Amino acid sequence: MQTIIEPPKNNDILASAPVTINIPFEILLATIEALPDPQKWQIYQTLSAKFSPHSAEAKAISRLPDQDDSSKWITSIEEDELVDEQALNAWLEKKGYQKANV
């Protein structure tokens, strides 16, 4: 049996209603695995943000609209700006981080 889903018409009152289709997990997984890598990554990002809203990925995605507003970021630095490594290391040690023995 084949299910055909037609796109909603502009005047359709159910245009924004969710569509539910029961697909066996194996078929769904095979379909996702057959997608190009950028689409797989997009699915991963979307689902991880939805199901794990406190993950690093979800937080990063939620910050995307604010990427041009430097007042929303703790650290902002311009491309040609030099980093004061001594001040940064002192701040890290003050926060409890230990210097790596490299």
Image (cartoon, rainbow, N blue to C red):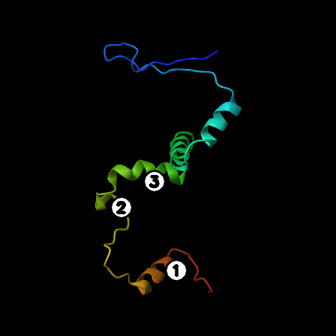
Task: Residue at 40%, 21% (x, y): give it.
Answer: 16
**Rendered location of residue 52, percent (x, y):** 56, 44
Report if the CB atoms under discs 1 and 3 are less than 8 Å apart: no
Read off the residue under disc 2: 73
**Tag on residue 93?**
1
**Rendered view: 70 above or below 10:** below
The quadrant of the picture occupied by the N terminus is: top right
Q: Secondary structure at mark 3?
A: helix
Camera-side residue of 65 and 72: 65
From mark 1 to mark 3, how far is it between C-alphas? 26 Å
Residue at coordinates 55% horizontally, 20% vertically from top-left? Answer: 20
Q: Secondary structure at mark 2?
A: loop
Where is residue 94 drawn, in percent x and y?
49, 78
Q: Amino acid at mark 2?
A: Trp
Q: Amino acid at mark 3?
A: Ala
Residue placed under numbered mark 3 in the picture: 60
Of labels 3 and 2, the one closer to you: 3
Mark 3, Cα crowd under 10 Å, few <14 / some 14-19 / many 20+, is few
Residue 32 falls left or right of residue 60: right
CA gap between label 3 and label 2 equals: 12 Å
Tell me the quadrant of the picture where the C terminus can be found: bottom right
Q: Is residue 55 left or right of residue 28?
A: left
* First-in-chain label (1 vs 3): 3
Label total for image: 3
Tell me if 48 is positioned left or right of 70 in this view: right
Tell me the quarter of the picture where residue 14 sits: top left
Upstream in the sequence, badge 3 or badge 2? 3
Marked residue nearer the N-terminal end (1 or 2): 2
Q: Where does residue 72 sit, x and y in percent of width and height?
A: 33, 58
Which residue is drawn at the image coordinates 30% and 62% (left, top)? 70
